[in-house]
Image: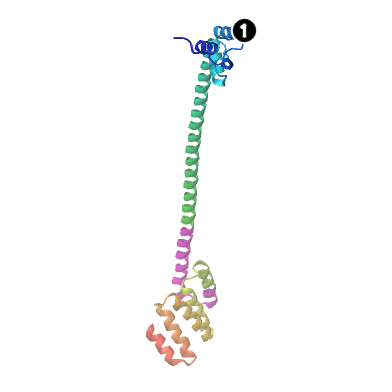
Amino acid sequence: KLAKDLEAVILKAIAKEKDRRYASALTLADDLQSFLDRKPVTAVPDTASYRLAKWTRRHKELTATIAVAVLLLGAAIAKIVLTLLDLEAALARAEQKTNEAISAGKRADDNLEKYKKEQIQRENLARGEGMLRAMPFVSDMEKIERQVDEVERLLPDHPAVPYWRGKISLDKGRCVEAIAFFDASIRLDPNTANAHAQRGVALKQIGRNDEAIAAWETA
């Protein structure tokens, strides 16, 4: 079987159409010499792939060396890509662990802050209720006023605060003011009997007897 290039040279040399044949014996000889030298021949259409194929056949050792180099370079690039992917995955895992640690630390801080607030609230409640239990045994109204101020600071929403404000106002003869304080105490705790009873006393002192009786009945 003839080589493709040699077959193309022969077919061009014996072509029926004159314009398809070699212009001279010299050009035929040049093509034959190119075939022997493994160079491109004019009988074959000149394309980049054709020229490359001829060049690789003429330089087999160099082509093999280049192929090995390309393979080694490809392997090295593949290894670098894999290393970078592993590094990226490791960085992602490290970032996730860092975020988890930050979240855990924040939760711990929040829990500690919550515990501190609850502890302060418990301490304030214990101290405030202790002062409230002692108030009935205090006869000095000025001292009671100071204690009410302190209880209000510790327990601002405790119904006993307006109740004792009302008691102080009632002791000073300010009945209308006392009634307002007792009303405030009842709003905070509708079931506080003392506030209803003292409100009845204040109402009685200003002549609102029917309302006073109703307050005492509620108490």
Q: Quadrant of residue 191?
A: bottom left
Q: Quadrant of the N terminus?
A: top left
Residue 214 location (% of width, % of height): 40, 88
Q: Quadrant of the C terminus?
A: bottom left
Of residues 22 and 3, which is closer to you in this image? 22
| Image height of 45 relative to 200, above or below | above
Of residues 85 and 2, which is closer to you in this image? 2
**How many numbered markers are drawn?**
1
Q: How is the image coloured?
A: rainbow
Q: Amino acid at mark 1?
A: Leu
Residue 59 visible, this angle: no
Residue 181 location (% of width, % of height): 50, 80
Residue visible at 62% across and 7% down?
26
| Image height of 153 relative to 8, above or below | below
Of residues 111 and 42, which is closer to you in this image? 42
Q: Does the magenta portion include 41?
A: no
Answer few, some or many: residues within 10 Å of disc 1's Cα (few below 14, many 20 plus, some between 14 and 19): few
Residue visible at 57% across and 21% down?
48
Residue visible at 47% across and 81% down?
183
| Disc 1 secondary structure class | helix
In the image as oriented, which residue stretches furthest toward the left?
Answer: 217
Q: Does the magenta portion include 134?
A: yes
Residue 68 location (% of width, % of height): 51, 16
Q: Which residue is mark 1?
A: 26
Residue 66 visible, this angle: yes
Q: Which residues are magenta?
A: 117-145
Residue visible at 51% across and 75% down?
144
Residue 10 location (% of width, % of height): 52, 10
Of residues 137 and 147, which is closer to you in this image? 147
Give the main secondary structure, helix, strand or loop, of the magenta stretch: helix
